[in-house]
Image: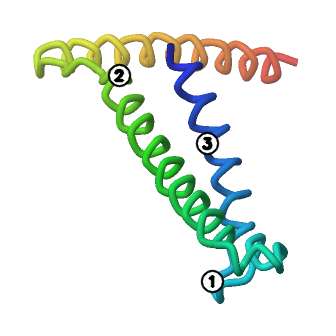
Amino acid sequence: MNILFSSIIIIASILLILVVYIQNPKGGGLSSDFGAAQQIGGVQKTNDFIDKATWILAGLIMVFSIILTIRSKTPEPVAPDQMQQGQTQQQGQGQQQGGQQQNGQQGQNGGTQQR
Protein backbone atom coordinates (compact mmCIF):
# COMPACT_ATOMS: atom_id res chain seq x y z
CA MET A 1 0.00 0.00 0.00
CA ASN A 2 2.87 2.33 0.80
CA ILE A 3 4.32 1.68 -2.66
CA LEU A 4 1.01 2.71 -4.24
CA PHE A 5 0.87 5.95 -2.24
CA SER A 6 4.51 6.70 -3.03
CA SER A 7 3.87 6.11 -6.72
CA ILE A 8 0.89 8.46 -6.67
CA ILE A 9 3.00 11.14 -5.00
CA ILE A 10 5.77 10.76 -7.59
CA ILE A 11 3.35 10.89 -10.54
CA ALA A 12 1.49 13.87 -9.07
CA SER A 13 4.81 15.66 -8.50
CA ILE A 14 5.88 15.17 -12.11
CA LEU A 15 2.49 16.34 -13.38
CA LEU A 16 2.64 19.35 -11.06
CA ILE A 17 6.04 20.30 -12.47
CA LEU A 18 4.62 20.11 -16.00
CA VAL A 19 1.49 22.10 -15.14
CA VAL A 20 3.50 24.83 -13.42
CA TYR A 21 5.91 24.90 -16.36
CA ILE A 22 2.97 25.48 -18.73
CA GLN A 23 1.80 28.45 -16.68
CA ASN A 24 3.23 31.87 -17.30
CA PRO A 25 2.90 34.37 -14.44
CA LYS A 26 2.43 37.26 -16.89
CA GLY A 27 -0.64 35.76 -18.51
CA GLY A 28 1.19 34.09 -21.41
CA GLY A 29 2.08 30.44 -21.39
CA LEU A 30 0.01 27.83 -23.17
CA SER A 31 -3.11 29.97 -23.21
CA SER A 32 -1.43 32.76 -25.21
CA ASP A 33 -0.84 30.35 -28.10
CA PHE A 34 -4.54 30.17 -28.92
CA GLY A 35 -4.67 33.66 -30.52
CA ALA A 36 -8.18 33.77 -32.01
CA ALA A 37 -9.64 31.85 -29.11
CA GLN A 38 -9.01 34.84 -26.86
CA GLN A 39 -12.10 36.52 -28.24
CA ILE A 40 -14.29 33.48 -27.58
CA GLY A 41 -13.16 32.87 -24.01
CA GLY A 42 -11.09 29.74 -24.60
CA VAL A 43 -8.14 31.31 -22.80
CA GLN A 44 -10.10 31.74 -19.62
CA LYS A 45 -11.16 28.09 -19.67
CA THR A 46 -7.55 27.00 -20.20
CA ASN A 47 -6.34 29.16 -17.31
CA ASP A 48 -9.10 27.82 -15.06
CA PHE A 49 -8.18 24.23 -15.92
CA ILE A 50 -4.48 24.86 -15.25
CA ASP A 51 -5.26 26.58 -11.94
CA LYS A 52 -7.54 23.76 -10.83
CA ALA A 53 -5.01 21.13 -11.90
CA THR A 54 -2.29 22.90 -9.91
CA TRP A 55 -4.36 22.98 -6.73
CA ILE A 56 -5.63 19.42 -7.13
CA LEU A 57 -2.14 18.00 -7.69
CA ALA A 58 -0.72 19.98 -4.76
CA GLY A 59 -3.58 18.73 -2.58
CA LEU A 60 -2.99 15.11 -3.63
CA ILE A 61 0.69 15.37 -2.79
CA MET A 62 -0.11 16.87 0.61
CA VAL A 63 -2.83 14.35 1.53
CA PHE A 64 -0.86 11.27 0.46
CA SER A 65 2.26 12.54 2.20
CA ILE A 66 0.32 12.90 5.44
CA ILE A 67 -1.20 9.43 4.99
CA LEU A 68 2.25 7.90 4.44
CA THR A 69 3.58 9.67 7.50
CA ILE A 70 0.74 8.40 9.69
CA ARG A 71 1.07 4.85 8.31
CA SER A 72 4.81 4.69 8.93
CA LYS A 73 5.75 2.60 11.92
CA THR A 74 7.21 4.45 14.83
CA PRO A 75 9.78 2.62 16.94
CA GLU A 76 8.46 1.30 20.21
CA PRO A 77 9.81 3.14 23.24
CA VAL A 78 12.39 1.15 25.17
CA ALA A 79 12.02 0.95 28.93
CA PRO A 80 15.01 2.25 30.95
CA ASP A 81 15.55 -1.24 32.43
CA GLN A 82 15.86 -2.78 28.97
CA MET A 83 18.30 -0.05 27.88
CA GLN A 84 20.57 -0.75 30.86
CA GLN A 85 20.46 -4.50 30.24
CA GLY A 86 21.39 -3.99 26.60
CA GLN A 87 24.30 -1.72 27.52
CA THR A 88 25.69 -4.15 30.08
CA GLN A 89 25.46 -7.01 27.58
CA GLN A 90 27.34 -4.96 24.98
CA GLN A 91 30.00 -3.98 27.49
CA GLY A 92 30.46 -7.60 28.56
CA GLN A 93 30.91 -8.69 24.96
CA GLY A 94 33.40 -5.88 24.36
CA GLN A 95 35.45 -6.92 27.40
CA GLN A 96 35.52 -10.54 26.26
CA GLN A 97 36.73 -9.55 22.82
CA GLY A 98 39.28 -7.15 24.31
CA GLY A 99 40.69 -9.89 26.54
CA GLN A 100 41.06 -12.22 23.60
CA GLN A 101 42.92 -9.57 21.63
CA GLN A 102 45.28 -8.89 24.54
CA ASN A 103 46.04 -12.62 24.93
CA GLY A 104 46.80 -12.83 21.22
CA GLN A 105 49.15 -9.84 21.39
CA GLN A 106 50.98 -11.26 24.39
CA GLY A 107 51.51 -14.53 22.56
CA GLN A 108 52.93 -12.68 19.59
CA ASN A 109 55.23 -10.55 21.73
CA GLY A 110 56.35 -13.57 23.72
CA GLY A 111 57.19 -15.40 20.52
CA THR A 112 59.39 -12.55 19.25
CA GLN A 113 61.20 -12.21 22.54
CA GLN A 114 62.11 -15.89 22.67
CA ARG A 115 63.94 -15.78 19.34
**Lateral position of residue 60 relative to residue 83, left or right:** right
Give me the C-alpha separation between circle 1 and circle 3: 21 Å
Label 2 residue SS: helix
Distance CA(mark 1)–CA(mark 2): 37 Å
- Residue 98: x and y in percent read 51, 19
x, y percentage for residue 81?
11, 15
Disc on the earlier residue, 2 or 3: 3
Q: Is residue 32 left or right of residue 1?
A: right
The residue shown at (44%, 34%) is: 64
Q: Position of residue 37 (x, y in %)?
A: 76, 73
**Residue at image point 37% right, 16% down:** 90
Quarter of the figure with residue 26: bottom right
At mark 1, the secondary structure is: loop
**Location of mark 1 (residue):** 25
Query: Which of these two is toward me, 104 or 54?
Result: 54
On the image, numbered disc 3 is attached to which residue? 12
Label 2 is placed on what type of residue? Arg
Residue 77 percent across, percent down from the top left: 19, 21
Q: Residues within 10 Å of mark 3 (few under 14, many from 20)?
A: some
Q: Closer to us: mark 1 or mark 2? A: 1
Q: Label 2, on which residue?
A: 71
Query: Hey, what amino acid is under mark 1?
Result: Pro
Q: Nearer the viewer, residue 24 or 16?
A: 24
